[in-house]
Amino acid sequence: MGNTFGNIFKLTSFGESHGTNIGGIIDGCPSGLSIDLNFIQNELDRRKPGQSNITTSRTEDDKVIFMSGIFEGKTTGTPIGFVIPNNDSKSKDYDEIKNVFRPSHADFTYQEKYGLRDYRGGGRSSARETACRVVAGAIAKLILKTYKIEISAYVFSVGNIVANEEELDFEKITNNKEANIVRCPDNNTALKMIDFISDLKKKGNTVGGQIKCLIKGVPTGIGEPVFDKLHADLAKAMLSINAAKGFEYGSGFEGSKMLGSDHNDEFEAVGGKVATKTNFSGGIQGGVSNGEEIYFKVAFKPVATLLTNQKSIDKEKNSIEIKAKGRHDPCVVPRAVSIVESMTAMVIVDHLLRNRTTKL
């Protein structure tokens, strides 16, 4: 249960961190969409491990193999099946934790829920699964290109190091020529982030951070009432990502400090179209898009697996001290940028397709 995301445009993922493959089935993708394999691979390369000295040293090519749903370079409208081989798993690194629980990790909760667990690399709870989301998200992005909708996410903060939003240069984080490995468009701040993460990696420690996402070109009227509000579905999508701890859109928590007279986005007519003078709503009102830019932030906790001594318990509830082995990210946010974009793309595509049934 809980392995399928979406209502019309759906992804069902499968596989574990150290299994032979991970993969998925994408259902509900319209037929006739031209599939750009190079674009999809580039999206996977932005997420894959081993891409820089501030990420895990696990080396995976993340070469996706499509098995169905695509014929002569276009989608057929039938389920798109795919697999991504696991080529660099080192299961022996996890032998010492098969009977113990890492603090703040899913080890304990998975054991309690299922009565057993695949302890190798975290099994199904591993962020390795998110590669499947990037494949589906890349196809969703190809759909969004036909609507001229653009999604761009970036690292907003690492620990207490925060990007200066007056110094952002988005050319530095475009898909084809990312200028820095931390994926922050404020280059001066990016260098500080890289130094900080590099130092933590040497110490076997980790840190969290925030990713900000912008969505441009979403037409008005996208989103469903009551339970399937657009921002609610975006929140669910983001909070389903490994290590995500918080979501806010528009003015977010800062909006709770404002007066209504300051917070309300007044309407005006611009070029024959309805617009708002401000955008504290974050492009969504009543759960439905209003045509303005949609923006939100996602907060990620520090990676739970530390390469330093920690106190915990084993299966028999004995107190122990553990020091994890293996290859782990000291900070997830640089690699999570593509995941945030992918989940966003799936949500927007799903709502675009649902919106076709709203009115004649």
Image (tube, rainbow, N blue to C red):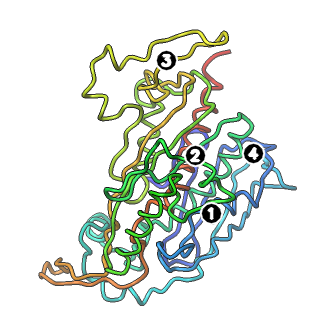
Could you classify mark 2 by the number of other residues whose Cα lies within 10 Å: few (under 14), some (14-19), or many (20 or more)?
A: some
Tell me the residue at 57%/51% (across/down): 11
The three-letter code of the residue at mark 3 reads: Lys
Per the rendering, the mark at residue 277 is 3
Name the residue type under label 2: Ser
Tag 1: amino acid: Leu
Mark positioned earlier in the residue sequence (2 or 3): 2
In the rendered image, the quadrant that contains the C terminus is top right
Determine the residue positioned at 62% across, 12% down.
270
Q: Position of residue 44 (x, y in %)?
A: 62, 63
Instruction: Give how far across and how far down residue 100 sits, in percent.
Output: 25, 80
* CA neighbours of label 1 inside 10 A, class few (<14), some (14 to 19), many (20+): many
Q: Secondary structure at mark 4?
A: loop
Q: Which mark is residue 152?
A: 2
Q: Which residue is mark 1?
A: 44
Bin the neighbour count of mark 3 within 10 Å (Cα to Cα): few under 14, some 14-19, many 20 and up.
few
Q: Quadrant of residue 251?
A: top left
- Give the mark, 2 or 4, whose residue is nearer the N terminus: 4
The answer to whether 106 appears left or right of 69 in the picture is left
**Which of the two discs, 2 and 1, labels the residue nearer the N terminus?**
1
Between the C-alphas of marks 2 and 4, the distance is 27 Å
Gap between marks 2 and 1, in whole Å? Answer: 15 Å
